[in-house]
Amino acid sequence: MLSATFLALATLAAASPITPRQSGNAPFTWGKAYSLVVNVTDISTDFQSNPVHGLKVVGVHAGAGLNSPTVTFNPESHGDVFFNSLTDHTVRLSGGTPSLPPIGVKLYDNNPSAGNPPFLHELGFNFGNGTWGFGASAGPLNPRPCPQLWAPLEGTFVVCDRGIEAPTYPRFAVQFVEGQANSGTHKWYQPEPHVPANCVAVKLVPKCATPSENDGKSSNGDVEAENVQCYPDVGAIQWAEYSECW
Ligand SMILES: *[C@@H]1O[C@H](CO)[C@@H](O)[C@H](O)[C@H]1NC(C)=O
Ligand SMILES: *[C@@H]1O[C@H](CO)[C@@H](O)[C@H](O)[C@H]1NC(C)=O
């Protein structure tokens, strides 16, 4: 009787939801295509009335072969799908048409005449190879234990609330802000000082997706899709159970 009670208590204790923060990192696998999930590392900075944490990145049609990166508030949306080009270190949209140019992820120069604050760079998913230096994974180019999208410059991705919504001008723009605070090891959670007040700093976390058989084929020439680290289900990760990404 006593031992039965003891056993029951021991079982209860083993099933306790209080899990200590482990030393490992959230488990990821490898794949040749991924969607991008917005991760607000400092959740207190997220937009109060339109939180973007956990939303997926999509491009909104902004002209022929031009797409303006934003987030989708539609929980049914799977988000846009991307792949890394191993051949030229670009990131491109998956599922293109072999007889057309690829749609590459582009980073534009800071443009004060377009009203951009200092250090802010607009992004586009536009006809062309994409800007050299985008990629996703952890590894030599991203010496941190957590996979993420990285950019050709040091700094952070941001989601900015531009206040107005138009058919080709999404209100919440995924953009990039230059800075050094996030660089190097053990700096994953450092705030970047140049992030404008209407923007929130985010990591773009790769979620494994199904590649298209057309990936890498285009009228610009063929490239090889890279195998990259991705999480099977970003939304299911309990970050607090794992060691920090630093
Ligand atoms: C995602 O954000 C949470 C806080 O909201 C943080 O604990 C976790 O480390 C972040 N993960 C990545 C990969 O940035
Ligand atoms: C685009 O990429 C292809 C394949 O790497 C390359 O042959 C071509 O020269 C590139 N075009 C431009 C404009 O960089």
Image (cartoon, rainbow, N blue to C red):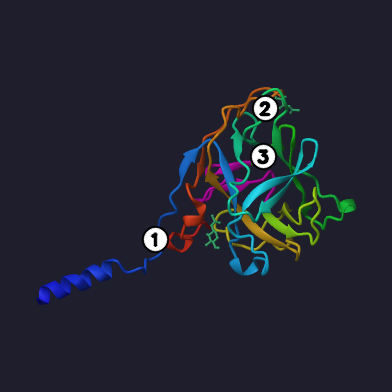
Q: Quadrant of residue 91?
A: top right
Residue drawn at x 70%, y 57% is: 159
Q: Residue furthest bottom?
A: 2
- The residue identified by callout 1 is 22
Q: Residue furthest left?
A: 1
Q: Which residue is mark 3?
A: 133
Residue 94, horizontal then vertical, whole percent: 62, 35
Point out residue 227 in the picture as x, y percentages from the top left corner: 52, 35
Based on the picture, tell me whether residue 57 belongs to the magenta stretch.
no
Q: Is residue 182 something one can see in this rendering? A: no
Q: Residues within 10 Å of mark 1 (few under 14, many from 20)?
A: few
Residue identifier under label 2: 97
Number of labels in the image equals 3
Q: Is residue 106 above or below residue 237?
A: above
Residue drawn at the location 41% of the way across and 55% of the way down: 24
Q: Is residue 152 covered in magenta? A: yes
Earlier-in-chain disc, 1 versus 2: 1
Say whether mark 2 is within 8 Å of ligand 2: no
Residue 217 seen in the figure: yes
> What is the distance, in whole Å, between disc 1 and disc 2 at their CAs?
44 Å
Q: Which mark lies nearer to you, 1 or 2?
A: 2
Q: CA distance from mark 1 to mark 3?
A: 33 Å
How dense is the environment of label 2, judged by Cα within 10 Å: few (below 14), some, or many (20 and up)? Answer: some
Callout in the foreground (3, 2): 2
Q: Secondary structure at mark 3?
A: loop
**Residue range (magenta):** 135-155
Name the image quarter holding the N terminus: bottom left
Mark 3, Cα crowd under 10 Å, few <14 / some 14-19 / many 20+, is some
User: Residue type at mark 2?
Assistant: Thr
Q: Ligand 2 shows up in which quadrant of the image?
A: top right
